Image: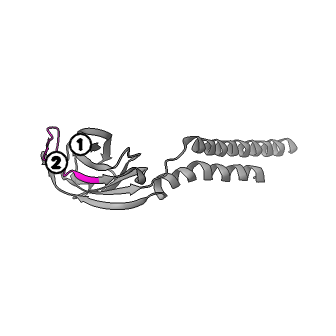
Amino acid sequence: MRPTVVLLLVLGIVLGPGYYAYCMLISGQTIRTIAMTERATRWTTADGSILRFSNGLAYKPVSLLLTPEMNSVMFRLDFNLEGGAAAQPKGSLQYQASLADFDQTILEHPIQLQSSDSTTQTVDVGPLDIPYAADYMFLLVETGKVATPAKVHLSVIENMKTPVMSIVWTGMGLVIAALIFSLRDVIRVATRQGTSR
């Protein structure tokens, strides 16, 4: 492989998948982890209002003080399916995660877990930018059939780096270009060997 092709490939991997993985998996700092275990069809919030859920059970709402200095913020949900995945209904397990400021929802994220997958599954919600400092409410609702409730841990991660997608796509373009040049070189060598016989 020619040095220029190797350089293209390395630059492409660093700018494409490498940069994206850094932003989504490595950047940021976990500032709080909360075990979500209690579930009910209605909850009373800190301000005294009552939340009712007719379409499924909701985990106890979590109150979070969030500020713009924490931007970007991501929520990581670790689901542990008690009794193993075999104890769950076949197909997907459906949840709805949301973040609200009083009665205004600023984030909604549907979640589907595959019951045939691992008993421990992780879902990232966000990242998003917090517009102003306030006590926000994080809510997780079961919207589908769940035979055995999952143990859920919510992690709040601050200062996540949001990937600039133009950089990611540039990196992927360099990787593709390196692969095309490599394939072209292989075809040329094979053609020369064929004509020299």
- Residue 66 placed where, x, y %? 34, 52
Which residue is painted at 20% across and 43% down in the image? 145
Q: Secondary structure at mark 1?
A: loop
Magenta highlight range? 48-64
Asked whether residue 46 is drawn in magenta, I would say: no
Report, in whole angstroms, how far the alpha carbon at label 2 lies from the one at label 1.
9 Å
Secondary structure state at the residue bearing disc 2: loop
Q: What residue is pinned by disc 1? A: 102
Disc 2 or 1, which lies upstream in sequence? 2
Taking depth in this image into account, of 146 and 46 the one nearest to the observer is: 46
Whether residue 179 sits left or right of residue 130 in the image: it is right
Q: Quadrant of residue 94?
A: top left
Q: Amino acid at mark 2?
A: Asp
Image coords of residue 47 (percent x, y): 16, 48
- Give the labeled residue for mark 2: 47
Q: Are marks 2 and 1 in contact (CB under 8 Å)?
A: yes
In the displayed image of the protein, which residue is found farthest to the front? Answer: 133
Q: Nearer the viewer, residue 46 or 41?
A: 46
Residue at the (75%, 46%) spot, across then down: 186
Q: Residue furthest right?
A: 196
**On the picture, is 167 further left or further right than 185?**
left
